[in-house]
């Protein structure tokens, strides 16, 4: 069971847009988010908020350094 793959997403922030705004998006468009600059990113695993963390760069790749575990320990068993 521990080797089952789950979808993992790192969320920078959220926002809302009208369909009109979505259809008007072009290269260099700016989408405003609810998160403040400097707030931790959210690690969402299989649709569940599991942790928060900060972005780090390892060689040429982005990664997430965990700063807070959000889910109860029982969820990982």
Image: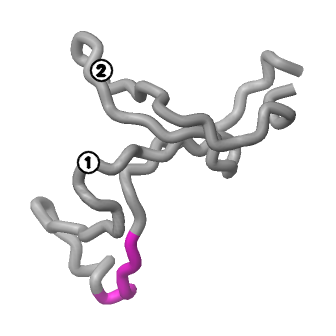
- Say how many tags the image has: 2
Q: Is mark 1 on a helix, strand or loop?
A: loop
Q: What stretch is highlighted in magenta?
A: 15-20
Q: Where is residue 18 in the image (x, y as percent from the top left)?
A: 37, 87
**Front one among 38 and 7:** 38
Task: Name the residue beneath numbered marker 1.
Answer: 38
Q: Where is residue 22 in the image (x, y as percent from the top left)?
A: 32, 77
Q: In this view, does 64 lie above or below 35?
A: above
* Quarter of the rendering containing residue 31: bottom left
Asked whether residue 38 is drawn in magenta, I would say no
Q: Do the residues labelled 2 and 1 touch (CB within 8 Å)?
A: no
Q: Position of residue 62 (x, y in %)?
A: 31, 26
Q: Main secondary structure of the magenta part?
A: loop
Quarter of the N terminus within the rendering: top right
Task: Name the residue beneath numbered marker 2.
Answer: 61
Quarter of the C terminus within the rendering: top right
| Residue at image coords 22%, 72% | 25
| Residue at image coords 72%, 27% | 5
Q: How crowded is mark 2: few (under 14 residues within 10 Å), some or many (20 or more)?
A: few
Q: Which residue lies furthest to the top in this view?
A: 59
Is 25 displayed left or right of 27 in the figure?
right
């Amino acid at each position: 069971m521990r080797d089952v793959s789950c979808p993992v997403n790192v969320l920078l922030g959220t926002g809302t847009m009208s369909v009109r705004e979505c259809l008007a998006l072009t290269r260099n468009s700016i989408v405003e988010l609810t998160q403040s600059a400097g707030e931790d990113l959210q690690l969402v695993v299989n649709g569940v908020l599991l942790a928060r963390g900060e972005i780090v760069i390892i060689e040429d790749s982005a990664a997430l350094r965990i700063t807070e575990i959000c889910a109860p320990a029982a969820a990982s068993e």
